[in-house]
Amino acid sequence: MSAYEPTATKRGVFSIRTPEEVTSPVSLLSGKGDEMRRLFVVPAAFFALIIGAQAALAVSPHFNYANVTSVTSNSITVSFKESGLGHSLDSVQITLSGTAECINPGSHHPKAENKSGFLVGDTFSVSNGQATGSLTYTVTVTPSCTPPMTLAFTDLVVTDTTFNDSISIPGTFIAA
């Protein structure tokens, strides 16, 4: 094998290039008629870099759902799924907030101290850009809701404190 390699030029005339010129990336972008290649390769590489960087940083957190799954005489459980978390985080901090109050038989809460706001939270693993789980709050309302009053939960909000993303759960949930 020769130390030099013949190369056809644009007009069919052969020129001799050294092995360094043949394998060098610079040689691909030099010579007559290579201006078009240079005009295509450089912007294409830049565009690929920009698109790749945006895809790697694409994070758009949003809750797919947040539902009340259980209400007992003294607790409430909410399940959730959040997507769009990207692939760079291992976990997110999720909280559940709301109001627990005693409701009288007329469906009104008395003007008493047996109403309180609450906040519970936990850390949840992120897998494939998603976090799923559930949070439970156990009531510590005092004085307790004695019959004929019942416990109700309102103003429920599930929040991802890592991304400041939240979803409200409308309605009033009465303990069974």
Image (cartoon, rainbow, N blue to C red):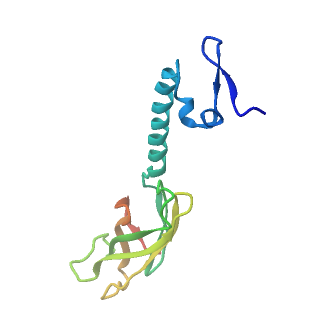
Q: Nearer the viewer, residue 164 or 137?
A: 164
Q: Position of residue 157 (x, y in %)?
A: 36, 64
Where, by quadrant of the figure, is residue 50 drawn?
top left
Q: Nearer the viewer, residue 162 or 104?
A: 162
The N terminus, quarter of image: top right
Report x, y in % for residue 90. Answer: 50, 67
- Residue 35 as seen in the image, left or right of residue 107: right
Question: Can you give x and y, in whole percent of width and height, for residue 146 in the image?
Answer: 36, 86
Direction from residue 120 to residue 68 in the image, left or right: right
Residue closest to the far left:
111
Residue 169 appears in the figure: no
Q: Furthest-bottom residue in view? A: 143
Query: In the shown orientation, is residue 82 left or right of residue 165?
Result: right
Q: Is residue 157 above or below residue 42?
A: below
Residue ID at (70%, 28%): 5
Q: Quadrant of residue 15?
A: top right
Q: Residue at x 52, y 24 (%)?
A: 37
x and y, in percent, of residue 136 in the image: 46, 76
Looking at this view, is 62 or 156 the one in front?
A: 62
| Residue 96 as seen in the image, left or right of residue 49 | left
57 up-or-down from 7: above or below: below
Residue drawn at 69 percent across, 30 percent down: 4
